[in-house]
Image (spheres, rainbow, N blue to C red):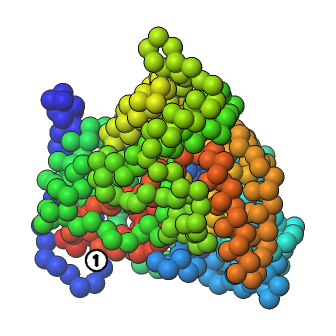
Amino acid sequence: MKFKLGMAAGLLAALALSAGVAKAEPVPGGTLRVLVHPEPPHLVLALGQASGTATIGSKIYESLLTYDFDNNPQPGLAKSWEVSEDGLSYTFRLQENVKWHDGEPFTAADVVFTTQEFLQETHPRARTAFSRVETVTTPDDYTVVYKLKERFSPFIYAFEVSSAPIMPEHLYRGQPFDTNPVNENPIGTGPFKFVEWQRGQHVRLEKFEDYWVEGQPYLDGITFHFIPDPTARTIALEQGMVDMAQFDAVQMSDVERLRNNENLVLADKGMEFLSPLILLDMNSRVPPMDDVRFRKAVMHAMDRDFVRDRIFYGQGRVPTGPIASTTRYYDPNVTIYDYNPEKAKALLDEMGLESDADGMRAEIRLIPLPYGEHWTRFGEYLREALSKIGVRVRMENADAATWVQRYTNWDYGMTYTFFYQYADPALGVSRTYLCDNVRKVFLANANGYCNERVDELFELATEEMNETQKQAHYTELQQIITDEVPMGFILELQFPVVMNKDVRDAITTAVGANDNFARTWLDR
């Protein structure tokens, strides 16, 4: 521990908190210092949406829209939009003075290339939305018209920055997307441009002087620091060595301690669009998880109230199914899994799983999410809980990059992570369960679950304009998924976002810390 803390102290030695007098209006200047954990595998949002990638990449890239705290669309790269009465045509009128960080002009061609080619190949959630487009036309360089094959009511929510980060056609056309050298020096339209990445230490962005909003951004730059040790991260926040930390950069066990620090504030908004839901992914290709009785036994073996209270320190609520209670069309009237180890054992008895000499009936491989101590503790809890019903858990620890690779390539027995809801089940939920999303793409349908009725209900719900009937489709869908339990529903997570009291206007939309920070400033 001393060695790790010493390394962190050395890394942060040059960071000092400066005092200032409160100001009424934004004042340009200063560098925002943000903690990110874990260090992301890359910064290109269109190639993957790992937590750190989204936090950093959202300052480099932009999409057509952002969303207010009530999830109403707001202008981004699109200054206005219209939806036809039949719900089939969406017309976006683009900002006309936008440049890429290399100085090339942004046009409608970039939007069409991104949504109809780039994201179709690399982004399972975007593919769900944009594969529904029948035609795209560009009447001029600053107008894009999408004509859908059928009504898809969540389409207006598909333009959040991690859902549809617009990519520069002139740098990717004719090049392999995932190995393009540009990925090492990402080029976007956002308020901050990439400067350097010192692996294991920091990513540095600086103000884009030709940003399309006059006078913005206010900050001179942002530096994202990587400190592996959780205690060192907390000390850095408390001592003013950094200005902000969010998501897994904040240790759950330290939330109350940080909340009581007079120099810090915790955001009370900014999760409305994301609504993260922790899911336990049980690979249905791997026995005994191919048997629904085993998956149900796993659910009954877990005390999810304990998980919420003792591992995630009350930061969330126990879910009932695949749709979070904060998301539209949620219905609690589903199959409920209470904590009942005896019921779990009875299900294993029904399967005919017999105990070995050690009292174990089955063995599974578990890859814990390598994002921090609380995630490790959940893996350890899961190992203990399942051992009590006769299931041996082999923990296979991996770093973040290896975890992403193994999960993407279906090389796991069980694993767990959090999935964002993205304001509508058709965007944040469907990708995990659709048959045609069983693909080796990160955060697609990795476990191989496929139920044609579920696919049909997602389709009916997204086409339906009548809200009562739409709710009926989603209710039936939730009932089926909770009964077949392809994923374990663990926790509706409330990620903490901690800031120095001098940080202003960092949380201004429903995507919170993953917005672009063009309006953020330092009151010093």
In this rendering, does residue 523 appear at all?
A: yes
Residue for point 22% across, 73% down: 523
Task: Count how many numbered circles sit on residues in the image.
Answer: 1
Residue closest to the eye, 165 or 176? 165
Residue closest to the eye, 448 or 321? 321
108 versus 221 height, above or below: below
Spot the residue most to the bottom.
85
370 vs 428, left or right, is left
The x, y position of residue 356, in whole percent, is: 51, 14
Residue closest to the eye, 160 or 426? 426
379 vs 158, left or right, is left
On the image, which quarter does residue 132 sit in? Answer: bottom right
**Tag 1 secondary structure:** loop
262 versus 172 height, above or below: below
Q: Quadrant of the C terminus?
A: bottom left
Q: Quadrant of the N terminus?
A: top left
Residue for point 45% across, 74% down: 509
The x, y position of residue 296, in whole percent, is: 57, 42
In this rendering, does residue 409 appear at all?
A: no
What amino acid type should be assigned to the residue bearing mark 1?
Val
Residue picked out by circle 1: 27
The x, y position of residue 482, in whole percent, is: 61, 54
248 vs 413, left or right, is left
440 vs 217, left or right, is right
182 versus 129 height, above or below: above
| Residues packed near mark 1 inside 10 Å, few (<14), some (14 to 19) or many (20 plus) | some
